Image (spheres, grey):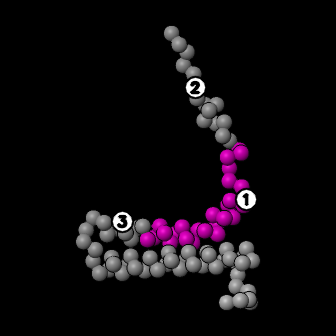
Amino acid sequence: MEPIVTVQEAVTAFGDFMEPTDAELAAIEQEMPVILADVDLLDAQITALDRVPSEIDERRIRRARRRALAARVALLNRTADTAGTGRSGGAA
């Protein structure tokens, strides 16, 4: 008979060093408006999947799509400003 070996060590072997770093948490926090806007868009789309979308469903999807796009643009603008690659005078 072969002994049964537990996998507890394999499961818990990825303890502390697998936690996100402060920089990763800051990046997630910065991207949170985009994530939430995408979740709202998916929610609106999922709601309309199982039936013919009504005018209200279509409006909700359009609004959610615009919010997601606006959140992405805002994130890109913040990222560009932080990285110092914002618009500066120069050749056009």
CA gap between label 1 and label 3 equals: 34 Å
CA gap between label 1 and label 2 equals: 33 Å
Give the side of residue 43 with respect to residue 30, left or right: left
The C terminus - image quarter:
bottom right
User: In this picture, which residue range is highlighted in magenta?
Assistant: 16-41
Local SS, label 3: helix
Q: Would you say the residues marked 1 and 2 are in contact, meaning their CB atoms lie under 8 Å apart?
A: no
Q: Is residue 29 magenta?
A: yes
Quadrant hosting residue 56: bottom left
Quadrant hosting residue 55: bottom left
Q: Dot 1, how many residues are within 10 Å of its Cα: few (below 14), some (14-19), or many (20+)?
A: few
Q: Position of residue 28 (x, y in %)?
A: 63, 63
Q: Which residue is mark 2?
A: 6
Q: Would you say the residues marked 1 and 3 are in contact, meaning their CB atoms lie under 8 Å apart?
A: no
Q: Residue at x 33, y 76 (%)?
A: 57
Q: Which residue is mark 1?
A: 22
Q: Which residue is mark 3?
A: 46
Q: Is residue 31 magenta?
A: yes
Q: Dot 3, how many residues are within 10 Å of its Cα: few (below 14), some (14-19), or many (20+)?
A: few
Taking depth in this image into account, of 3 and 82 the one nearest to the observer is: 82
Q: Residue at x 74, y 89 (%)?
A: 89
Q: Position of residue 72 (x, y in %)?
A: 56, 75
How many numbered discs? 3
Q: Position of residue 54 (x, y in %)?
A: 27, 77
Q: Amino acid at mark 2?
A: Thr
